[in-house]
Amino acid sequence: MTAQEQQALLRLTLRAAYAGSGQDSAAREQLRDSAERMEALTGYRGLVPDVLLERVSLSTDAACLAAPGLRQLAFELAVGACNAGGLRNDTQTRFLIALGRALGLTAPAMAGPAAEADALATLPLTGPKRAAQATAGCDLQAAVDTMVLRYAIANGALQRLPLALASLATLALQQRMIYQVGAVYGCAPTREQARDFLRDAGFSPLQQYLEDIGRKFALGLFHEPRNGWVGGSTAAITGGAFAKTHALGHLAERYYAGGCAMSPPMLQAELVVLGEHARALQPLYESQIEQQARQIDREALLAWTQNQ
């Protein structure tokens, strides 16, 4: 993949992210911050003004992607950006249709990723029965610890996959985890409340998605076989999903156990401490993360995520 192709893919991802931002100035400013962090991760500066000032058109970026695999990847990246903050709206759907046409994709090539992204954006929060039964007959703290660790390992595995929608699956599992932690303390949040919790903690879903995609480009994950996984020298870098999920799970525990009384600044300060602890824990679970990463392929991504 050339530098020109990578920049085209990143710009198309940003276009998709901005397609759903509307005219809300605060939302667009937050999105710009996230986009600039993605720029910093990839080393490609100027992507945001390229998109906002229309210095490079959608059709120009689409024309840069000659290989069928890159065109498919571009659409999957865009679908993920449109669904990161929730099920996409009509404006985002129209954008995806226009993008698919510019990329020359067939209807099935667009419908498959769109349906999978929709399913991830609306993943049931209750999860498999084993999650609901986790607190039965055992110590409450131990049950929450086990639950949070399971989701952290799962998301650590997802982050190692060279798949755009794996980043969307990570967000879906974070929200399921937050719901289940809240339910333990008698305060099960709605899906939107779980997303609000992530935003208040300083990790909005769209921000996480853009940064995760930027990290995957920086590490060259999209150069890997599509059904492969990444381990070895990249393990310590891609461990961010494990640490972030682990810290968010225990932050949710403190938040719901305390009656939802923590303000956004308090949540963000607490998350710094929890994040440091989680990063120190990650090497202990490296083999489990690698094992799970090996077990996931492109065809099984949605089914695997649904079963977590």
Image (cartoon, rainbow, N blue to C red):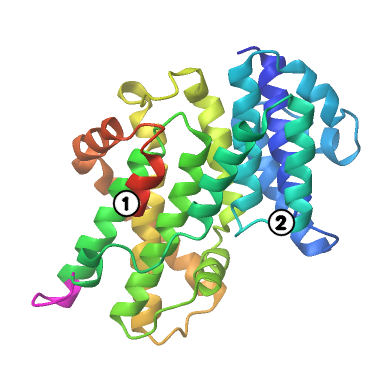
Q: Position of residue 133 (x, y in %)?
A: 18, 72
Query: Viewer-nearest of labels 2 and 1?
Result: 1
Between 305 and 262, the one nearer to me in the picture: 305
Residue 296 is labelled as none
Circle 1 residues within 10 Å: few <14, some 14–19, many ≥20 = many
Name the residue: 61% across, 58% down: 85
Task: Tell me which numbered mark, 2 or 1, is placed earlier along the sequence.
Answer: 2
Q: State left or right for residue 158 relative to residue 97.
A: left
Considering only vertical position in the picture, is 207 above or below 61? below
* Element under disc 1: helix
Horizontal side of residue 78 vs 58, given as left or right: left
- For the residues marked 2 and 1, what is the alpha-carbon distance in whole angstroms? 26 Å
Q: Which structural element holds mark 2?
A: helix
Residue 121 picture location, percent across and down:
53, 56
Q: Which mark is residue 30?
A: 2
Q: Check disc 1 and report the residue beneath it.
A: 152
